[in-house]
Image: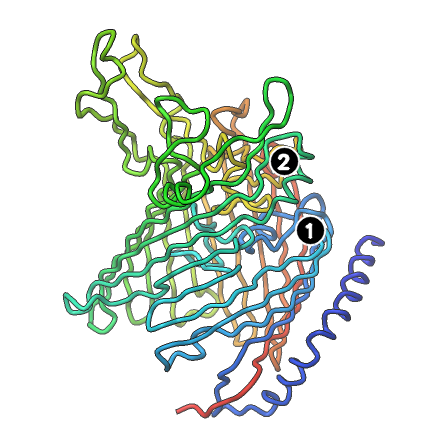
Amino acid sequence: MNRNNNLYISLFSKALVLSFCCIPSASLAQSGMEDQSVDEEDKSMEWEVEMQGSFSDGKTPLWLNANKYGLSSLEQNNGYLRNKLIKPLDMDSERRWAIGYGLDLVVPMGYTSHFVVQQAYVESRWLKGVLSIGSKEYPMEMKNQTLSSGSQTLGINARPVPQLRLALPDYWKLPILGGWVQLKGHIAYGMMTDDSWQHSFTHKQEKYADHVLYHSKAGFLRIGSEERFCPLSFEIGLEMAALFGGNPYFRNSRGEMIAKPTEKGLQGFWHAFIPGGADSGEGVYANKAGDIVGSWLMRLNYDSDRWKLGIYADHFYEDDSQLFLLDYNGYGEGKDEWLKRKSNRYFLYSLKDMMLGAELNFKYGRWVRNVVVEYLYTKYQSGPYNHDHTINIPDHIAGTDDYYNHSTYTGWQHWGQVIGNPLYRSPIYNENGKIEILDNRFVAYHLGVDGQPSDRLDYRLLFTYQKGWGTYSEPFTKKHHNVSFLLETGYHFKHGWSAKMGYGMDFGSSQMLGHNAGLQITVSKKTGIGKKVLRK
C-alpha cells in the first residue's frame, strides 16, 4: 500500500504544479463556457487535463498498455498527469484555409521518461491539403480506433514521431465519374526521438541506433457515393514506411561496439521514398537500404438504415518479398553466366500472412453498439529459409522476413513499443537488454465490443487469444499461448468531467506476456476556450 500511496501523493503534487500553468486557460474556459446554452456551439480551442494511475500484480496487462500512442508503462505502479491544448483545423471548416496547433505535455511516474512531450505541432490547411510540422497522434486507417487489435504498419501503439507531413487527410472526390471515386493519402519525413532510451536499455552493449530518420507514405482509393442511394463502398490502400540514415551501432567479432555506415543526404531520402540501394556489408543479393515495411489495406462497407458492416484485410510485408509476392529467380548457366540474370523467371510466394477483420455497428444500439472480430496470421514470412543462388543451387529464394526486426536498425519500434500491432511483443518486455521482437510468428483471435447503456455510461470489452512460435532465428522450443482481457467502463459527469476504470488480465507463458492483472483509473476534464457562435 505504501507504493500506491506514494504514487498518489507524487501525482497529486505534480498535478498542483501543472495546474497552475492551466489557471489562465481554465479561467477563460469558465468565463466562456459556464453559461453556454443548447443554442450555442463552441468555435474555439479544446483544453483537457487528465490524471491516470495504474496498479498491477506483475506487469501492466496488455490492453491497459497497448494502443495508447506509447503513453503507457509496464511498471507495476505507474501514472501520469496530462495537460492538452488543441486547436483543430475543423474549427475553421467554413474557410478555404485554416491554422491548427496542439501542445500535449505529460508528467509521468514509472515511465521510460521523466517528462513527455506527447504532441507539439502546428499545421495549416489550404482547400483539402494539410501541411503539418511536429509530433501529432494520427489515427489508424480502416479500423476501429478503440476495439481493433491495431494496424500492422502505421498503428497507434508507439509515441508519435516528429515529422514534416503533407497530406490529403480526407477523401477528395475526383471530378470524374460523377464523384464515385475518391482519393486520400500522405507523405512524411521525420526523426526518431528514442536515442536516450536505447542507450539506457542496452547500456550500449547491444545493437542500438542514433539519429535514425523516418519516412512514411500512404495512398487510398474509395469507390462509392454517400450522396446516392448505394449502401456499398470499397476502399483499398497501400501504407509504406522506412527507417534510414542515422548511426546504427553493432558489436563486432572483437566485442567492440562500432558504427555501421548508412546512406546519408539526398540519396538516403530518395531510397526511402523509392526503395533502393543497399545496407553496408550486403553483397550481390543486397536487399534495399534501410528498414522497409508496409501493408496492403482493403475494406468493403455496407451501410443500411439501422446498421453498418465493414469487412477488411491488412497484409503486412517486410522489405519487398511480400509486397507483390514475387521474387526474381532467373539466372544463366555455366562458369561465366551463373550470376547473370537471363530469363524472366520468378518465384511466387504464398499469400498466408494476413489480418482479416469485421466491424459491425448498430446505429441505435445501447448495450451493444460496435462489435469487432479479427484473425491475425504471421507465421509464414516468405518461408523458413533464405538462400542465394549459387553455382550448384539454381534457385534464389528469400525468406525469413523476420517481421519488425532488422539486421542494421532496432526494428519497427519507438521508445520500446512496436509502431504497428502490439500483438508483436514489443522490445520493452525484453529482459536481455536487446531491442528486438522475440515473438513475431503467431496466430491470434481478437474480439472487441462496446456499448453505451445510458447517455453518461459507456463500456468496452477486449478479448484476445494468441498462439506464438517465437521467431525463425530464435524459435520457441514449443508452441506457447496467451490470453489477454480488458473490461473498461466510463462515466461522463456534467461540466466536461469524466472518469474511467479498466481492469485487465494476461494469462500465458512467460515466453509471451506471462500472468498479469491490473487496475487503471483515469479522471479527466474537457472544455472549450474562447468565443461561441449561435447554431443555425
Residue 515: assigned label: none
Residue at point 22%, 68% (across, down): 225
Q: Earlier in the sequence, mark 2 or mark 1?
A: 1
Structural distance between the alpha carbons of marks 2 and 1: 15 Å
Q: Position of residue 414 (x, y in %)?
A: 55, 46
Task: Between residue 305 and residue 88, name the one nearer to us.
Answer: 88
Q: Amino acid at mark 1?
A: Tyr
Q: Position of residue 26 (x, y in %)?
A: 66, 81
Residue at point 47%, 47% (across, down): 214
Task: Between residue 19 and residue 268, name the one nearer to us.
Answer: 268
Please tell me whether residue 381 is drawn above or below residue 115 in the rendered image.
Answer: above
**Disc 2 vs disc 1: Cβ atoms closer than 8 Å?**
no
Report which quarter residue 355 is drawn in: top left
Describe the element under mark 1 as helix, strand or loop. Answer: loop
Describe the element under mark 2 as helix, strand or loop. Answer: loop
Q: Position of residue 407 (x, y in %)?
A: 49, 30
Q: Amino acid at mark 2?
A: Asn
